[in-house]
Amino acid sequence: MSGAGRDAGRDASQPPPPRAAFYALPPGGLRDYVTLLHLPYTAWCLGTVAIGLGLAPGLTWTRLGETLAAFALAVGVAAHALDELRGRPLGTAIPAAALWGLALVSLAGACAIGAVVAVGSTLWLLAFVAAGGVLVVAYNLELPGLHNDVVFALAWGGFPVLTGYFAVAETLRAEAVLAAIAATLLAHAQRRLSTDVRQLRRRVVAVRGELKLADGTAEPLSRQGLLAAPEAALRALAAATVALGAALVVAQLG
């Protein structure tokens, strides 16, 4: 349905429906593909990868580019394309065939990069490549037992740190494990915050009520009021993770 058709079918006295995410662009055309990337969360994941890379001794610009490119394809494109196939949470009009194509080509590209790096360094890296491929498919297609808060926190928090570190150091040390624990907890915080945000944006049709304050006054509840704090926290956490990853990389390469 066209934008005009949607507007004509909506009561003019009602506010427009909220965007599916705070970073979602107005629907249609190439904007849907930009929205599909979940840019703040893709940047968060790449920041997490950079933390692992920046902690590892011997980081090079080449290894930095290879690892970030692989994760950008696997998470930024493939994972999000598969996620959109499951119920259209972002409400895009991207054809299913295009989503499948993006997912398969991007995941294949990510695995190919990982395989090339493994052949040139250590074949043990192939275990991380295989695990990453399984996680992208299993989590985003919501396979039984693999689509939950614990798997999300480990797969989108700890795993990128460990993979980034191992891709450079070819081993795992205590600092990598500790950083992975921190990243897992950050991803858990993201999940808890974003779950409520998604509920408010995508499933709640009306918000009613008020907060009674100790001084006898009242503040009305609203969707935007309930969204403001968790979405501000999500933006800050994403930016902080990117900044930390960048700082560690600069410390190694600067």
Image: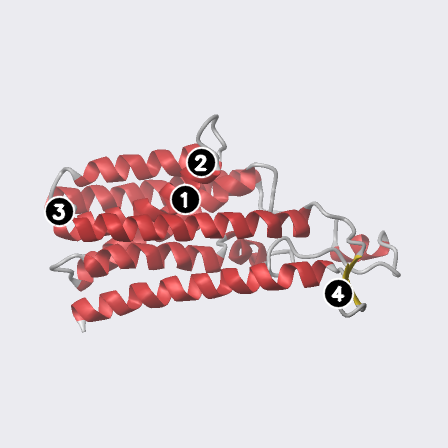
Give the number of the mark in front: 2 or 4: 4
Q: Badge 2: few (under 14), some or many (20 or more) residues near its Cα, within 10 Å?
A: many
Occupied quadrant, residue 217: bottom right
Q: Which x, y percent locates residue 7?
A: 81, 57
According to the image, label 3 marks what residue? Answer: 170
Q: Amino acid at mark 1?
A: Ala
Label 3 sits on a secondary structure element that is loop
Q: Amino acid at mark 2?
A: Tyr
Label 1 sits on a secondary structure element that is helix
**Which of disc 4 and disc 2 is earlier in sequence?**
2
Give the number of the mark in front: 4 or 3: 4
Instruction: Name above or below for residue 163 compared with residue 27.
Output: above
Give the number of the mark in front: 1 or 4: 4
**Which of disc 1 and disc 3 is earlier in sequence?**
1
- Residue at horizontal 30%, vertical 67%? 246
- Residue at horizontal 49%, vertical 44%? 81
Residue 238 is at least partly visible in this image: yes
Label 3 to label 2: alpha-carbon separation: 27 Å
Farthest residue to the top: give it. 144
Is 90 displayed left or right of 233 in the figure?
right
Q: Are marks 2 and 1 in contact (CB under 8 Å)?
A: no
Badge number at residue 98: none
According to the image, label 4 marks what residue? Answer: 213
Q: Which x, y percent locates residue 202?
A: 67, 48
Give the number of the mark in front: 3 or 1: 1
Q: Which x, y percent locates residue 100?
A: 48, 38
